[in-house]
Amino acid sequence: MKLTVVLLIFFGILFFHTPVITAENIEFASATVQQTINQPLARDRVRVVKLNDYGNHGAHRNIELETRMLQDFANLVGLEIEWIDTFRPEEALQKLIGGDADVSISVVPIDRSYDSRILATEPIALQRFRVVGQSSDTVENPFGLNRKTLAVKLSSPLWPYLEQLREVLVDLSLQVLPDDLSSQEMLKLVSDRTYDAVLLAGDFRSEPITHQSGLKYLFDLTGPEPVSWYVRADQNHLVEQLNEFIKRYHTAYNIPDPSVRHFDDIKQQGVLRVITRFDGNNYFLSRGRPAGFELELARRFAKRHDLRLEVLVGHEDEQILKWLRSGAGDLITTRIHESLLRDSAELSVSRDYRHDAAVLISSATRPIQSKADIIGKFIAGYEGSSTIAAAKDFLDGSGTVIAVDRRVSLSLLIDRIESGTIDAAVIAGHQIKSVLDLSRGAISGLSIPNPYRYRWTLRGDSPQMAVEIEKFIQDEYREGTYNILERRYVAEESELQPTLTDLSPFDELLQTYSALYDFDWRLIAAQMYQESQFNPEAVSRNGALGLMQIMPETAVGLGLQNPNDPEAGIHAGIKYLDWLRNRFDNHIPMDERTWLALAAYNIGYEHVRRARTRARKIGLNPDKWFGNVEVAMRQMTRSYWESNSLKGCRCGQAIIYVSSIRSLYYAYRNFVLAIKSYQQPASPRPTTLPPMPLFETRDGMGS
């Protein structure tokens, strides 16, 4: 009896106690990130302890992404990071408490997360630990592990608890597994009966074992627990800085959910996820909305199959291909370097649907007409374009390639060639006529092979989609779509599409009030476009007004008047979104609170609350919108006509609303390149531009 009482108390604490964030609730009402984070540590570096590269604790953690987040934070505040690797959570905690580190992004042993000597930041993710065993096993709780072997990764934060459990269950055998084992490799150890069970970390969902026959989740060893970074208790200001950074920018770090789908799955779900990147004439912003040759073609393909298009914006070729292989996207519509596609059985490519050469232009008095003429020369190209990538491949170090800001006009580029500041420039073939019209002193010469061809890339296991794409391209050629898009996006232009730093006519107001309530202003810009297409006079059928479509009574309740006034409307919308975000529990990671708040903005808090309740009942994560609460809300849409309690629910609209904002937000995040305008350098030769600012990365290519 005494043993039972001890176990019930012990397991009750573990199962039902949810950690409380110990960081102070800081008010940042009037501070920008830069202003608030103006007081760095006494030294110019921050020491960060993390588990080694193998310490990935499950689907809820992405150590690579978290290190990137922290590096961005350090760049913002002007600190250098000194990384300290460890192998076990206990070791990481001791380094933090002992003063050998300032921040820990490793997990903390579960029994030490309330240590008064450390402070936790806002949660980065949620985790729960689950025990997996044979389908025939009847174990339902830790008591049933006696006389069994449980395999656990070395870096698990549950080792202190498991060691205590072994003192109670004397015949429990614990087997240490190396951290470089994947979840599938761990499951195989149970499937082939090497061990009776394994401890997995992850989310609510059960995908890790769906393809492993004969296995099942036996029970949850912990509930959903917040995953935070940790700071020593004497570093209050540092935890405040980190919290504001997380609150404002957590949504900016996109981790696509992998879900390999075949064409039948895509048709059933009604959504086609394409992967692209900024690409001159092919994917750019026009009046706040993505546009371009390639994007329009993708939209037509989606419409043909009655699909909604979702766009995932990537950067480098390798990252884009990784997303396709993992199932984060269904189809790559941007151009990929042919060397990465050659002889790859796992990938399939469509036929070419457009052709455009890369051409060198030079001065008629100093012509470049062969590769030998390039040796030692300075060749300019538009930053991130496929033409500059082609030039780098072709020159192979025999000349110097200079990246030029996309906002530099073609005429100014020609002026630099004629003045001798640069020797030549590489442009797209369709621009030759514009060059010759602008200058008699410039000539077109050497044609350069372009390794970026206009074709779509998909997984090799998608034969049905490959057939549909082939039919589509053939039909579009016959219908003259190619010529229509060529005139719209290529033939009628006189210069490259510029990289836009202005998303809307109201960017300054967006930046001011987003900073006031700790939102990324680009997210609010995406929401504003979804609400009103930047029209301050917009009025909905329900009487919502202005840029943010605020109801007049809501504006009054927020202490603001006249939502039709751009400043008042923006302030009211952001303040209302902040109020909604604060209604969701603090244990929910900030990015998820933001998506849930956006859904509530569209459909009302009560409907989101009901959807979260339904998600919990059907085994989904009530604290995660995409793939979880949105799924429950889709069920609410189907049951709309069956339940008077859901009267007035526009559940399907809310799903599209949040998804559209996320897609546009990620596009905005990649389009806003706040770099200096091109200026003629003081030296006789131009130099490369400075690095991109925080959160903005170079897209691999363009027009």
Image (cartoon, helix red, strand yellow):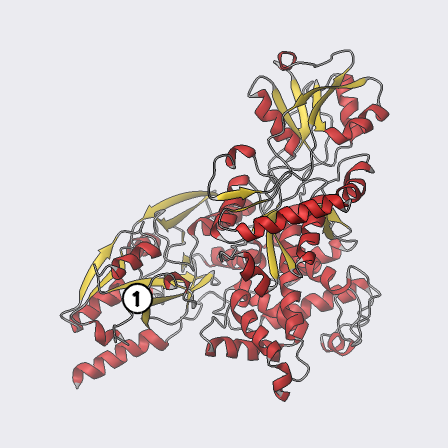
Q: Reply above or below: 131 against 288.
A: below
Residue 279 appears at what percent x and percent y? 67, 41
- Tell me the residue at 74%/40% (across/down): 498
Residue 640 appears at what percent x and percent y? 63, 81
Q: Using the image as rendered, state which of residue 598 and residue 199 is in the foreground.
A: 199
Q: Quadrant of the C terminus?
A: top right
Residue marked by disc 1: 214
Q: Using the image as rendered, state which of residue 118 and residue 157 is in the foreground.
A: 157
Q: Is residue 608 visible?
A: yes
* Quadrant of the rendered image containing residue 12: bottom left
Residue 191 appears at what percent x and percent y? 27, 61
- Tell me the residue at 64%/72% (across/down): 652
Type of residue at label 1?
Answer: Gly
Image check: 649 left or right of 491? left
Mark 1 Cα within 10 Å, few/some/many (few <14, many 20+)?
A: some
Image check: 615 left or right of 698? left
Q: Using the image as rendered, state which of residue 210 and residue 22 is in the foreground.
A: 210
Image check: 628 left or right of 424? left
- Tell me the residue at 75%/71% (across/down): 550
Residue 651 appears at what percent x and percent y? 64, 74
Q: Reply above or below: 266 against 481.
A: below
| Residue sticking out furthest to the bottom | 644
| Helix, strand or loop under label 1 | loop
Q: Using the image as rendered, state which of residue 190 and residue 580 is in the foreground.
A: 190
Q: Quadrant of the N terminus?
A: bottom left
* Quadrant of the rendered image containing residue 632: bottom right
Q: How many marks?
A: 1
Q: Is residue 30 visible?
A: no
